[in-house]
Image (tube, rainbow, N blue to C red):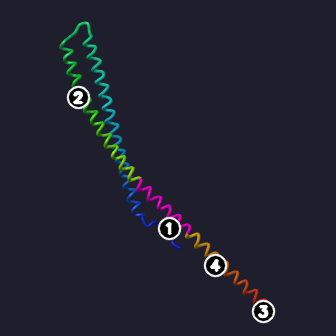
Amino acid sequence: MSGFRFKLDRVLRVRRATEEIQRVRLADAEFGARTRESEASARTESVRAAHSSLSADQSAEQLDPQRVLVAIEATARLEAIERAAQARAVTARSAAEVEHATWRDARAGVLGLERLEERERQRFRTERDTHEERAIEEVASRRAEAQRMAAARARNLS
């Protein structure tokens, strides 16, 4: 009896390669999403600091209207930058979620084929073991028959 060979081995190898490629793409997307989220968080902190500075300027004993106007404009620009950073973070996170779903599907395909391979491997082992047991039984029955024949000949000669 020849060794085990999984008929869908080529398909399994392709699916494993595809899953690995998708896993790398997922890692890249996750890294990008985390980077964008970190940038957005930093922009949010900048806006909070700008608001604090503006509040301090507005409540100063010596109110400088020019300084307050500059602070208002700067805060508005920082808020616009923060909104853009938040939008990029949301977009990057969405892209990462799409990559995750695609990877999960690829992984499920690999796992399904691996389970199928294991079932076929187990079936092969069972068939091989059955074949070996039959061969052993055949040899044993031939030996027993040969011993009976030898005993019968010995009785006939005596």
Q: Residues within 10 Å of mark 2 (few under 14, many from 20)?
A: some
- The residue at the far left in this view is 66
* Disc on the earlier residue, 3 or 2: 2
Q: In this view, does 21 lie to the left or right of 145?
A: left
Q: Quadrant of the C terminus?
A: bottom right
Proximity of marks 1 and 3: CB atoms separated by less than 8 Å: no
Disc 3 and disc 2: Cα gap in Å? 113 Å
Tag 4: amino acid: Glu
Is residue 14 placed above or below 61 in the rendered structure?
A: below
Q: Which residue is drawn at 30% across and 31% down?
A: 40
Q: Which residue is drawn at 19% across and 17% down?
A: 69
Q: Which of 80 and 67 is in front in this view?
A: 80
- Of labels 4 and 1, the one closer to you: 4
Proximity of marks 3 and 2: CB atoms separated by less than 8 Å: no
Q: Residues within 10 Å of mark 3 (few under 14, many from 20)?
A: few
* Disc on the earlier residue, 3 or 4: 4
Tag 2: amino acid: Ala
**Residue placed under numbered mark 2 in the picture:** 80
Disc 2 and disc 4: Cα gap in Å? 86 Å
Tag 3: amino acid: Asn
Magenta stretch encompasses residue 114: yes
- The residue at the far bottom in this view is 157
- Of labels 1 and 2, the one closer to you: 2
**Residue placed under numbered mark 1 in the picture:** 4
Q: Residues within 10 Å of mark 1 (few under 14, many from 20)?
A: few
Give the quarter of the image for residue 155. bottom right
Instruction: Give the residues drawn in magenta, as a range.
Output: 108-126
**Residue placed under numbered mark 3 in the picture:** 156
Is residue 120 placed above or below 46 in the rendered structure?
A: below
* Disc on the earlier residue, 1 or 3: 1
**Residue placed under numbered mark 4 in the picture:** 138
Secondary structure, mark 4, is helix
